Image (spheres, helix red, strand yellow):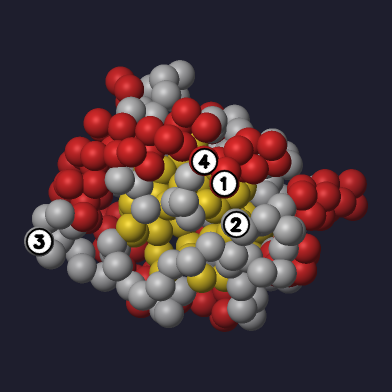
Amino acid sequence: MTTETGIADALEIIVLSVEDGVAAADGGATRLEVVREIQADGLTPDVRLVEALLARLTVPLRVMIRPRNTFLVGDDAHREEIRRDATLFADLPVDVVTGYVRAAADGSSEIDEDALALVAERVPRARITVHRAIERISGDPAAALRRCPAVDRVLSGGGAGAWTDRAAALEGLQASIAPIRVIVGGGVTLDGIDVLTARTTLRELHVGRLARAGQSFAQPVDAAVVAELRARWMETGR
């Protein structure tokens, strides 16, 4: 398990390679989310990449556990793939990112707690970020999240619409799930960051495209851009 303590501003950057990780760390990222296929909302990365990042960097890592591009566990074979992927990282000093939804008895959508428990069991020392699957459930997720003690973060973009509305939704989520922390992520813009920095309960930012040259998934993470984002998010005097 990596070491992060207290409630403080955090800047988490999505990385796809060692070069991305080095650039993000050089720019001042406080945490890295390691994935492959960023355009598919992030899938489980190669364990060799994670090992290489651990050998090169001291920045805490959270590794995506998501073998297929879906937020639903479709069948037993899919569940076995999730179990297999989680096991790859069981002995590494990393935390993880995962999360699935399922149909509730009343036809609404809820967190797939079995899938969450499966990952927690396979990577027992890791803390878990429940990613943007959270945006696909109905109702308040707080009770389900608290039933998995490994969960300490939830990643959400606050839905659609203007950033003022999204920030308000994220503040409501943060109030509901505390002490679990909200990481703001998903379509984040520079204007959105300016709105979010005024919300003192929202302290953690997750960035993918915005940290890359030309704001393009096809380009690598740019250390200078990350440094600018860090200054905008973490050095505003709030």
On the rendered structure, is 114 left or right of 7?
right
Kind of residue sitting beneath label 4: Arg
Question: In the image, residue 36 lies at what x, y percent?
Answer: 61, 33
Distance in Å between CA atoms under marks 1 and 2: 9 Å
Q: Secondary structure at mark 4?
A: helix
Residue at the spot of label 2: 94
Q: Amino acid at mark 1?
A: Leu
Frontmost of labels 3 and 2 is: 2
Is 226 situated above or below 87? above
Q: Is residue 87 visible?
A: yes
The answer to whether one can see residue 206 in this image is: no
Q: Secondary structure at mark 1?
A: helix
Q: Dot 3 surroundings within 10 Å: few (below 14), some, or many (20 or more)?
A: few
Q: Residue at x 67, y 49 (%)?
A: 65
Mark 3 or mark 4, whichever is nearer to me: 4
Task: Check residue 54 in the rendering and tell me which mark sits there, or answer none.
Answer: 1
The residue drawn where x is 41% and y is 20% is 219
**Of circles 1 and 2, which is in front?**
1
Q: Are marks 4 and 1 in contact (CB under 8 Å)?
A: yes
Residue 56: image tag? 4
In the image, 87 versus 147, the foreground residue is: 87
